C-alpha cells in the first residue's frame, strides 16, 4: 500500500483530521482535510465535533493553540522538534520584566508565541487581525511581541506607540526577503503585483502593493485581476496559491525562503504520528486557561467587526 493510502486508512480508523499549515510541504497540503493559517486551522478543529484526533502539521505553538482551543481532543504534532524560532524569542521572564517597567500598558502577543507566554498577555492577535486588535484597545501605548516587524507595521497603521518585546524579535525566514530581487523581478514582469507578509522588513513592506497574512494573500490573489504575483512569504504558500488560481502566475520573491522547521514534517512522520499517536501536545490547564482567555478575546474583537 502506498504511504498516502496508509495515512488515509489510519486517519479513518482513528477518527482523525489532518490540518496542514500554508507553509507545509505540497504533498502534505494535498492530503490534508484543511490547509490554512494557524488560527483558521484551530477553528476548523473546533468545528469538527466528530474528530477525536487532530494531526496538526505545523510547528509547536500552532499545535499548542489547537490543544488549548480543543480540550477534549488529542492533538498530535508530527515532529517534536518543529519549533518556531520567533516564538522561542519571547520568554515569560522577559514579559514580566516589561510589565514591571510599564505596569499600566496592555500586552498584546502575536499568536507566534508559546502558550506559557500567551498566559501572560491581555489579548492575542494574528498577522491578519493585528491592526484590528490594537485599534480595539483603549490605550495609545502597547507592549507588543515577539515580532518587531509586525509591531512596526501595526504602529504605522494605527498611529499608536508600540513597544517591542523583546527588542529584536524576528522571523528568520521572512528576514531573507530584500528589495533587490523584487526590483529585478519587476523589470521582468512590470505588471506583477507584489504581496508582502508583515513579518518582512519595512524596506520590503514599503515596495509592496499588498501587505497581509497568508490567508489574506490567498483572498487577495483570488479577487485580483492581475495575472502575475511576486510573493514575499514562506515558499509553501505558493503551492496553495497556484492550486487555487491555476490561470495566474506566482513567483517567490527570494527563491530560498524556506522555514526549515515547517519542513521538518514529512509524509513518513505524519504516518508514524498517526500510527503511534505521537507527539501528543498537552498544555497544563493553569496555563491553558489564561492563554485560552487571550485567544477568545481576540475572537471577540474580530467577531464584532465582521
Ligand atoms: O498565523 C499563521 O498561520 C502565520 C504564522 C502566518 C500567516 O500569515 O498566516
Ligand atoms: Fe516561525 Fe517564521 Fe517559520 Fe513562521 S516562517 S514558523 S514565524 S520561523
Image (spheres, helix red, strand yellow):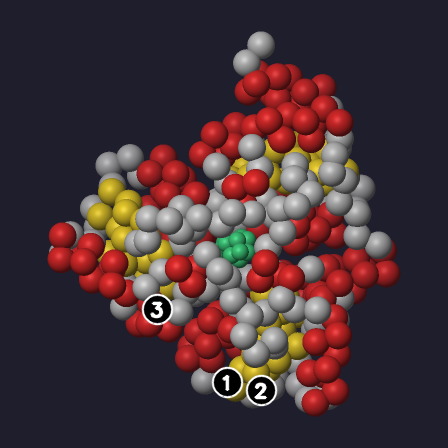
Indicate the secondary structure of the residue bearing disc 3.
helix
Whichever of callouts 3 and 2 sits on the residue coming sooner in the sequence is 2
Asked if 104 appears above or below 3 in the picture, the reply is below
Indicate the secondary structure of the residue bearing disc 1.
loop
Looking at this view, is 104 or 297 the one in front?
104
Whole-percent x, y for residue 239 in the image? 39, 38
Residue picked out by circle 2: 141
Residue picked out by circle 3: 205
Q: Which numbered disc, 3 or 2, marks the residue closer to the eye?
A: 3
Whichever of callouts 3 and 1 sits on the residue coming sooner in the sequence is 1
Residue sitting at x 61%, y 80%: 143
Residue 245 shown left or right of residue 160 in the figure: left
Residue sitting at x 70%, y 51%: 64
Asked if 58 appears above or below 91 in the picture, the reply is above
Which image quarter is the N terminus in?
top right
Answer yes or no: is residue 88 visible.
yes
Q: Which numbered disc, 3 or 1, marks the residue closer to the eye?
A: 3
Whole-percent x, y for residue 139 in the image? 60, 86
* Cα separation between marks 3 and 2: 23 Å
Q: Around disc 3, counting alpha carbons within 10 Å, would you say few (fewer than 14), some (14 to 19), or many (20 or more)?
A: many
Residue picked out by circle 1: 160
* Cα separation between marks 3 and 1: 18 Å
State yes or no: discs 2 and 1 in contact (Cβ < 8 Å): yes
Amino acid at each position: 500500500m502506498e504511504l498516502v493510502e496508509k495515512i488515509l486508512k489510519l486517519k479513518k480508523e482513528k477518527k482523525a483530521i489532518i490540518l496542514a499549515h500554508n507553509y507545509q510541504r505540497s504533498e502534505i497540503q494535498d492530503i490534508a482535510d484543511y490547509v490554512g493559517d494557524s488560527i483558521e486551522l484551530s477553528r476548523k478543529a473546533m468545528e469538527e465535533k466528530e474528530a477525536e484526533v487532530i494531526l496538526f502539521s505545523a510547528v509547536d505553538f500552532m499545535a499548542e493553540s489547537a490543544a488549548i482551543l480543543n480540550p477534549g481532543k488529542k492533538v498530535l504534532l508530527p515532529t517534536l522538534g518543529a519549533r518556531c524560532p520567533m516564538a522561542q524569542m519571547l520568554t515569560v521572564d522577559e514579559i514580566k520584566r516589561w510589565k514591571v517597567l510599564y505596569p499600566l500598558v496592555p500586552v498584546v502577543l502575536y499568536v507566534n508565541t508559546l502558550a506559557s507566554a500567551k498566559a501572560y498577555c491581555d489579548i492575542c492577535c494574528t498577522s491578519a487581525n493585528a491592526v484590528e486588535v490594537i485599534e480595539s484597545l483603549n490605550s495609545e501605548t502597547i507592549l507588543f511581541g515577539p515580532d518587531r516587524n509586525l509591531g512596526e507595521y501595526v504602529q504605522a497603521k494605527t498611529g499608536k506607540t508600540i513597544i517591542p518585546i523583546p527588542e529584536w524579535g524576528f522571523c528568520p525566514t521572512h528576514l531573507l526577503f530584500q528589495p533587490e530581487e523584487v526590483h529585478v523581478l519587476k523589470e521582468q514582469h512590470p505588471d506583477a503585483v507584489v504581496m508582502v507578509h508583515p513579518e518582512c522588513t519595512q524596506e520590503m513592506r514599503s515596495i509592496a502593493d499588498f501587505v497581509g497574512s497568508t490567508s489574506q494573500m490567498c483572498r487577495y490573489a483570488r479577487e485580483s485581476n492581475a495575472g502575475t504575483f511576486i510573493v514575499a512569504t514562506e515558499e509553501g504558500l505558493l503551492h496553495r496559491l497556484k492550486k487555487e488560481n491555476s490561470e495566474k502566475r506566482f513567483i517567490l520573491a527570494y527563491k530560498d525562503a524556506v522555514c526549515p522547521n515547517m519542513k521538518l514534517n514529512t509524509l513518513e512522520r505524519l504516518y508514524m504520528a498517526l500510527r503511534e499517536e505521537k507527539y501528543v501536545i498537552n498544555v497544563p490547564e493553569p496555563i491553558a486557561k489564561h492563554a485560552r482567555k487571550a485567544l477568545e478575546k481576540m475572537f471577540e474583537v474580530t467577531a464584532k467587526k465582521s
